[in-house]
Amino acid sequence: MEELIDIYTRDRKRTGETIPREGAFLKEGQYMLYVLAILENLDGKFLITQRSHDKHWAGGWWEVTGGGVLSGETPLDAVKREVGEETGLNITGMDLEPVYSYENVDLARGDNYMVDIYHIRFDFSEQDITLQQSEAIDFKLATWKEICEINNRGEFLHFNRLCQYLGR
């Protein structure tokens, strides 16, 4: 099924336009929204997942949970959906607010987007995680040091943005 996205202005207002997410090419002043969820357990470890190798971009790389905000969704709806779909963890009912946001403009590729990052600390363990096989092939509860090591191999997405938020 084709995923549709809403197009937003720079001040995050919906334009009323909806387009297919796959192959979207956004013009100047047009944006789509993404969310990322830093999931941290009570031991201070972060849930990271390894992307399926057949992903068209960064297959096999490690990342935190996240994805695109679908048409009609709010970023809050999207982060709850993405966490549930990708990890099987239920964050419904938690008090969630974005802790960091950033903007990307790449007019040559039509890749303009805004991202809200949520940092969610709660009690979960490896036994609570169920991966969506079409999205991820592996997961780990990693220390920050382990995430840095994966990044040093050039295999971790969004690392610089996570560092900006975490002040590292």
Image (tube, helix red, strand yellow):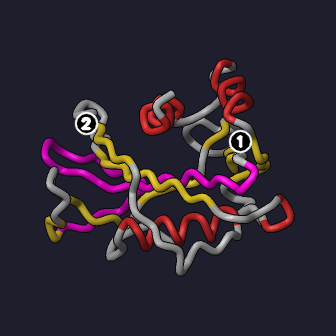
| Residue 41 inside the magenta-drawn segment | yes
Q: Residue at the location (37% across, 49% down)? A: 115
Point out the tag, 1 or 2, that comes first from the N-terminus. Answer: 1
- Please give left or right for residue 5 compared with residue 121 in the image: left
- Label 2 sits on what residue type? Val
- Badge 1 marks a residue whose secondary structure is loop
Compared with 57, 1 (above or below) is below
Asked whether 59 or 68 is in front, the reply is 68
Residue 52 shows in the view: no
**The quadrant where residue 146 appears:** top right
Q: x, y (%) of residue 73?
A: 36, 74
The residue identified by callout 2 is: 105
- Badge 2 marks a residue whose secondary structure is loop
- Please give left or right for residue 23 compared with residue 14 in the image: right
Chain part drawn in magenta: 17-43
The residue identified by callout 1 is: 53
Q: Residue at the location (34% across, 71% down)? A: 74
